[in-house]
Image (tube, helix red, strand yellow):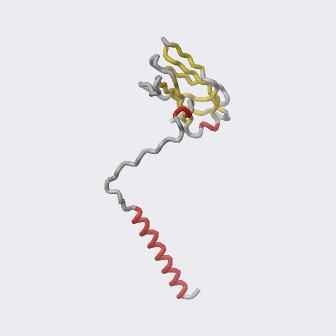
Amino acid sequence: MTNNAIVKMMKLAVITLGAVVGSSLLAGCDTNPVMAPFPGRPDLLPAEHYPQIAVTDTLDEFLFFAKANIQSAPDKPMSVSVPARLAEEYAVNVQYKFEFYNGSGRLMKPEMDFQYLRMPSRVQVFMSGAALDTDAVNWRLIVRSAK
């Protein structure tokens, strides 16, 4: 390789480096002096299709649920018990909570705290919760890895 070719390659490298640094500096410049908040994005999942049992993390791959047992009467708060089974070779620690909703679909307060549960391998356990008053007409179970 001749000295002339080496010089051309070095010039090209410097120009390329300058372009990369310059564009990154320009990208950092804020052209919005108002600093308006970003608009919220619409949820494409309609509320009526949201799952009644929501599982976070990667638990959905090996956590299975049977039909919920729901006890409800006009004079008694709703209570729910959901059978769950872990299809893994080892026990897993999870946390779960129930959310209860009134007739207009509003989340009822106070909310249940997350409950800790050690799920043994392949053995059915029950996740249970109860509303605090008789206005509850619907529920949702949220399960996550124990923190």
Which quadrant, please, contains the N terminus?
A: bottom right
Q: Is residue 28 left or right of residue 114?
A: left
Residue 58: image location, x then y, percent? 59, 40
**Number of marks in the image?**
0
Q: Is residue 24 left or right of residue 8?
A: left
- Residue 12 higher or lower than 101, as above or below: below
Camera-nearest residue between 79 and 39: 39
**Residue under the image location 66 percent in, 26 percent down:** 123
Camera-nearest residue between 4 and 35: 35
Residue 30: image location, x then y, percent? 36, 59
**Residue under the image location 53 percent in, 88 percent down:** 4
Camera-nearest residue between 104 and 22: 104
- Residue 132 higher or lower than 24, as above or below: above
- Residue 21 higher or lower than 112, as above or below: below
**Residue under the image location 64 percent in, 29 percent down:** 85
Residue 66: image location, x then y, percent? 64, 26
Q: Is residue 118 left or right of residue 36?
A: right
